[in-house]
Image (spheres, helix red, strand yellow):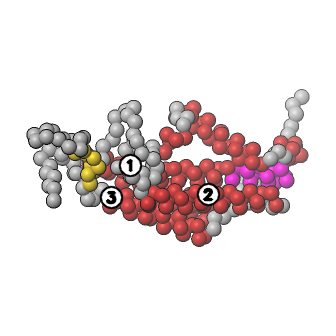
Amino acid sequence: GYATMTQDNWRSFFSFSPYLYGVGLLLGIWLTWGIFCVAWKPWDWIKGKDGRRSTSKLQGLLWTAVVFFAFGTVYAARASKGHFEPITTDIPANLLIAMGLSLGTTAVAKGITVAYVSSGQISKPAAGAEVKGGVIDEDDGKPDLTKIQLLGWTLIGVMTYLIRFCQHISTAELPVLQDIDTSLMVLMGLSQGGYLGSKLVSREVPRLTGLSQGSAAADTEVTVSGVGFGEQQAGSLITLD
């Protein structure tokens, strides 16, 4: 005959540490993404159209991972107590807003980058080319304050949420998804606005980022690198002083 899973059997199945199921959900998503999209390195998931790793994509990835982990953990903890009903109706408002803001910021930032690439203000690297610069760096390799704020408040928000969430799981009779502190939501929202504003205006003014050589004799060809030079480079003029 065939054995059937009773409610007590299911409760026993979920009686292990609920955190294992949250981690297992993340691993399952990673395996699915890797198999079907042939992308095993999460660090490569946050690359933008310009080939650089995107701060907004990293923020979206962090909050997505946190929500999936929390969802799997809460459901396992509730199932171990005999509650198998869906928890999608109990998602807190600020958690939904955080997901929406992070994904919205990612979409807007991607649109801005695509527009810059299309207009020639930034160039898309060749396939396989190594692109330097971290998630808090500008195109010239210098740290950008708006990116530091965006990533900083995101990390603070994620760590605060996870600490509060783990405390709730260990003490609650019937665990639920926790909400994000409203003050942190405001700070994260302001940092996202500053990041997008900086991304919009940073290309408006032409900027020099480097020279092929620091000094040269007369009539020596020197390559000037920069951003915001416009679509057509032929015939451009750079004046000094």
Whether the magenta-drawn stretch holds residue 192 is answered as no
In the rendered structure, which segment of residues is drawn in magenta?
A: 70-83
Q: In the structure shown, which secondary structural element does the residue marked by tag 2 occupy? A: helix
Q: Earlier in the sequence, mark 1 or mark 3?
A: 1
Q: Secondary structure at mark 1?
A: loop
* Left or right of 187 in this view: 92: right
Q: Given this view, does label 2 or label 1 mark the residue nearer the observer?
A: 1
Find residue 199 and name its label.
none
Judge from the rendering whether residue 167 lies leftward or rightward of residue 216; answer left or right: right
Across and down, in percent, residue 103 comes to 50, 55
Residue at the disc numbered 2: 158
Q: Which label sits in the foreground, 1 or 3?
A: 1
* Cβ atoms at labels 3 and 2 below 8 Å apart: no
The answer for how far apart the CA atoms under marks 1 and 3 are is 14 Å
Instruction: Identify residue for label 3.
Output: 202
The residue at 24%/44% (across/down) is 214
Q: Is residue 51 above or below residue 109?
A: above
Residue, disc 1: 141
Name the kind of residue labelled 3 in the image.
Answer: Ser
Q: Is residue 45 left or right of residue 197?
A: right
Whether 41 is drawn above or below 154: the answer is above
For the residues labelled 2 and 1, the Cα–Cα distance comes to: 27 Å
Choose the circle earlier in sequence order: 2 or 1.
1
Residue plotted at (13% across, 40% down):
217
- Residue 42, by quadrant, is top right
Q: In 3D space, how far apart are the residues under numbered discs 3 and 2 (Cα atoms)?
A: 28 Å
Which residue: 26% across, 59% down?
Answer: 205
The C terminus lies in which quarter of the figure? bottom left
From where the camera sits, is residue 100 visible? no
Percent of width and height locating residue 38: 52, 32
